[in-house]
Image: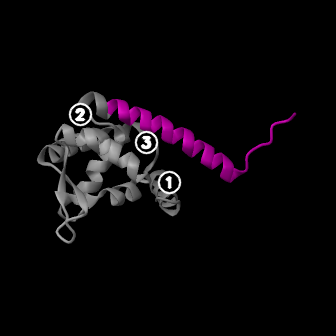
Amino acid sequence: MSKKEASPQGEILQRLFLSSAEITRQLDNSLGAIHGVGLTEFMVLQTLAAAHNGSLRRIDIAESLGRTASGITRMLMPMEKVGLVEKVSSARDARVSMVKISEAGERILEEASASFEQKAGQVLGDLSNKQTASLLECLRLLPGG
């Protein structure tokens, strides 16, 4: 039986999947070894830091990172335990639990951001400025971009 070749779009999705997995592995290893957080925890801290007042509902974090609410809840529990995030009540609705980046979380985010940028340079450093701009433009057109 012959193997059917993927369409150009199919090949793009396959390559994006494999590249994403490898980049995630490298960033998890790098951020974890130096700062004690993985890529997803880093992205949660980044999302919270960008939010108004540094706090969001769990569902908002999940939606912004393409995760499930239950997955985010499971991830936030150890982050809260080590003091990177904290629960706060919503000013509008006391029934709503908000998550806020803590001072320790802000410090870790600042330090990890430098490592993230360094790793980004290593991973994508072979791209020219024109290639980088073109790739970024294309990725912004994709779902989640």
Label 1 or label 2, whichever lies nearer to me, is: 2
Please state, as top left, top right, bottom left or bottom right, where the N terminus lies in the image. top right
In percent of the image, x 26 and y 38: which residue is there?
Answer: 78
Q: Which mark is residue 35?
A: 2
Q: Is residue 9 magenta?
A: yes
Dominant secondary structure (helix, strand or loop) of the stretch shown in magenta = helix
Residue type pointed to by label 2: His
Does residue 142 appear left or right of residue 107 in this picture? Answer: right
Secondary structure beneath dot 2 equals: helix
In percent of the image, x 26 and y 49: which residue is there?
Answer: 45
Identify the residue under disc 1: 135
Chain part drawn in magenta: 1-30
Q: CA distance from mark 1 to mark 2?
A: 29 Å
Q: Which mark is residue 22?
A: none
Q: Position of residue 82 (x, y in %)?
A: 18, 37
Q: Nearer the viewer, residue 20 or 76?
A: 76
Identify the residue under disc 3: 124
